[in-house]
Amino acid sequence: MPTNAITWLEQNRDAHFAELFELLRIPSISTDPERATDVRACAEWVARRLAGAGVPQVELIETSRHPVVYGTWHAAPGKPTLLVYGHYDVQPVDPLDLWLSDPFEPTVRDGKIFARGVSDMKTNLLTIIQGVQAAAVAAGGAPPVNLTFFFEGEEEIGSPSAEETLAGHFDQFRADLALSGDGGQTSPAQPRLTVAYKGITGLQIDLTTGSTDLHSGGYGAVVPNAAQAIAQLAASFHDADGCVLVEGFYDDVIDLTSQDREEIRAAAQSDESLLAEAGVFATWGEPGYTAAERRGARPTLDINGIWSGFLGAGSKTVTPCEAHLKVTARLVANQDNTKIAELIRQHAVKHAPPGTRVSFGESEHGSSPYMATRGFTGETVATRVLSEIYGKAPQIVRAGGSVPILSHFRTILGIDTVTIGFGLPGSQAHAPNEWYLETQFDLARTVYARFFDAF
Amino acid sequence: MPTNAITWLEQNRDAHFAELFELLRIPSISTDPERATDVRACAEWVARRLAGAGVPQVELIETSRHPVVYGTWHAAPGKPTLLVYGHYDVQPVDPLDLWLSDPFEPTVRDGKIFARGVSDMKTNLLTIIQGVQAAAVAAGGAPPVNLTFFFEGEEEIGSPSAEETLAGHFDQFRADLALSGDGGQTSPAQPRLTVAYKGITGLQIDLTTGSTDLHSGGYGAVVPNAAQAIAQLAASFHDADGCVLVEGFYDDVIDLTSQDREEIRAAAQSDESLLAEAGVFATWGEPGYTAAERRGARPTLDINGIWSGFLGAGSKTVTPCEAHLKVTARLVANQDNTKIAELIRQHAVKHAPPGTRVSFGESEHGSSPYMATRGFTGETVATRVLSEIYGKAPQIVRAGGSVPILSHFRTILGIDTVTIGFGLPGSQAHAPNEWYLETQFDLARTVYARFFDAF
């Protein structure tokens, strides 16, 4: 990147940092209806800042909840169009009394900025805009890549409007590839590229044995017990080793190649580190795969909740007549979330113990798995830029979590996404005292600027 | 019974019925601390009534909660001493809005008296006293059997003071046999003698996998899931047919003889009747035994509650770190509740899935099974009296429920108990609109009077 851009970033360091505090002060909690005005104010702030960076066309696209900040800066004929994704909304702040400082009054302690949304993902969002501006400075006018911006205000509530917005404005969002700033790094010295996110599907299984709870003295020996039945059903989903027993569950999973496994191994956390981080007594999971392979590249079926009968203090000699089970499955590339949900329903019907009836409630979760087309332009450019800046190649990681927007970009726009972000492990993204390392702020501006400059 | 006693009962019918209403109006809810004064007022009412029947020695024995009404009428030298048991406390009345009339203002509708405690067991208690008085009239002075009364005010809270009171006043309560009025009949035309009650033991199993709930995206594939683990553990207690798999669980159970089975069959409810009464889709239980055999003569292990993870509406992708299971076992003659509790703990430790830790909380339930010595005086006399009055022999029944006081009488006083009561199936004993058939009131006075007279 030319010296003038680096100098420009250095000269504007304090101003850019002050801007970050302005943005962090806006309580853009998307799930809270009482914060709708603040969420909109945040969208307007981001739109102004985007225009201030030189983006010629900026507007808000309305949705049924919170607006999308849309912008285009198409001044690089013959170059690809990059869809830049981020979200300006944040998680709620409860429990407020656990915060050491006001979540919406950013405070620096020990080199960390503390504020709600600082890690997820207002700092990444703002430094992307600052990076765009730096890249324009470097190029002496406009960035050397065509940019389209999609900054949503509903990521923390599951991006309910994203699909409709993308499909309804297909021509405006048409692009060659996407950059998402909604991610993190392994450590300040170790860059990371996440190439896969899992899909997800879920449902609630409701089981009944009859019309009323009964006294266990009179009936425990003679009628089915819903608590026992739900336990049997819940236990039927895995074998003793941890393999999922739902028929057909693994059918569409693509086997890992030795190259895949080597790549995953290279970025893998040690079991000791995993145990300490998770606070558990032991690791667990499908045999034949390492923890990193299971986390990123093998589907899972997770019991998220189970309940039946008497849950209070003391005891109550009840034979319960109803029971409930919440299940989600995390899916990998080539699996279909709708198909897997149906297989789970079929399993539940088949394995419900005699004398019980099951019915199903839908979960709000449902999205396809996402796996980047390996070696696409975004990966290539990001790998080159990150390798130059860090002096080492990024780790290639498959995430256990789900980022539904990436599968929407794939299915609606037909494009791949490269994710570059600067939050760090343990940054309390959805918890009290969310933080972001101040030095990562400087790094982020540079990396994004050089990424845009590299096209 | 001599005519003079029958005439006396007839002449006093209205007065006795009015007394019942007086007793029913006292809200002696033992579990409610705000009703402690009412509970004591009820004890005093019963003591006065007992003295009014001619019982020469009546007093209240204090406990840490509610007093025992104690009395003796020992005027039959050479005759056995009968310990007469009942309780004057009642269940709470919630939900009050489901009552069609005030629970403490007895109301007769369609031949039924509606009031809290009318079936469980104030009517039986009062008619016992009226029966004692009638037997004294018949004998021209005092009943032809020595009577000791133990009317407690804590039955509905598990008789917490009974053991200490009996042991602490051993000489006062020493008797040859006991009569309990805390029972019911199969139908107005069909008397019943319950010769066995199950013992009970229970515990709560708490399972953990680590120190914190985790995000299922990050950790579901790599760490144990407490909800899944508790389901596996809960499911490990029974085989697919319903046999209990706790090692040693059945070791001390005495096999049923063909005579036992015939006796149980003779009093058995049909499966159709059971299904309708319980409101279930199917019967269930240990193979090789009828429902009546399982209910009365085979031990069971019951899951009374299970919970882990997210129990709210919608979904939360959590990998839970803790889970809970409430278990009780109902035990039959010759089984030991302390031993079975230990076997259940051992089973839980052995079958807790890898990567989990279990600990135990005690249940407030724990009592020995009770099985009458068949053919003891109480059974013989009751069978003779009931057969004469009803024109048919009483059904011999083994109950699925537990009546801890009977095992206390056995272990502390060394005596057997015959239970005679007049509540009917469906009498809503612990529910709104508790009722007692008015014609049973007349029957009860006669049966008790003749029982005392028969010694």
Image: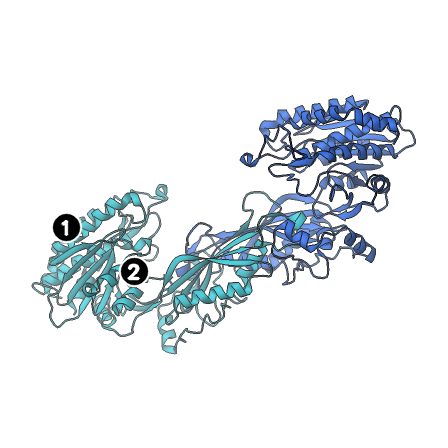
Chain colours: A blue, B cyan
The CA span between labels 2 and 1 is 24 Å
The quarter of the image holding the N terminus of chain A is top right
- x then y, percent, for residue A181: 75, 36
Query: Can residue A206 be seen in the rendering of this structure?
Result: no
Q: Is residue A314 above or below residue A50?
A: below
- Residue type highlighted by circle 2: Gly
Residue nearest the viewer, comparing B274 with B205:
B205
Q: Looking at the image, which residue sits at the far bottom?
A: B258
Picture quadrant of residue B269 = bottom left
Q: Which mark is residue B15?
A: 1
Q: Which mark is residue B2?
A: none
Find out whether the residues at labels 2 and 1 contact each other: C-beta distance under 8 Å: no
Crowd around label 2: few <14 · some 14–19 · many ≥20 (10 Å): many
The chain holding disc 1 is B
Determine whether, in the image, residue B386 is placed left or right of residue A55.
Answer: left
- Residue type highlighted by circle 1: Ala
Q: What residue is disc 2 on? A: B184
Q: Residue at x 24, y 58 (%)?
A: B86
Query: Can residue A340 be seen in the rendering of this structure?
Result: yes
- x then y, percent, for residue A369: 74, 47
- x then y, percent, for residue B353: 58, 61
Crowd around label 1: few <14 · some 14–19 · many ≥20 (10 Å): few
Determine whether, in the image, residue B95 is placed left or right of residue A406.
Answer: left
Mark 1: secondary structure: helix
In the rendered structure, which disc, 2 or 1, sits on the residue that comes first in sequence?
1
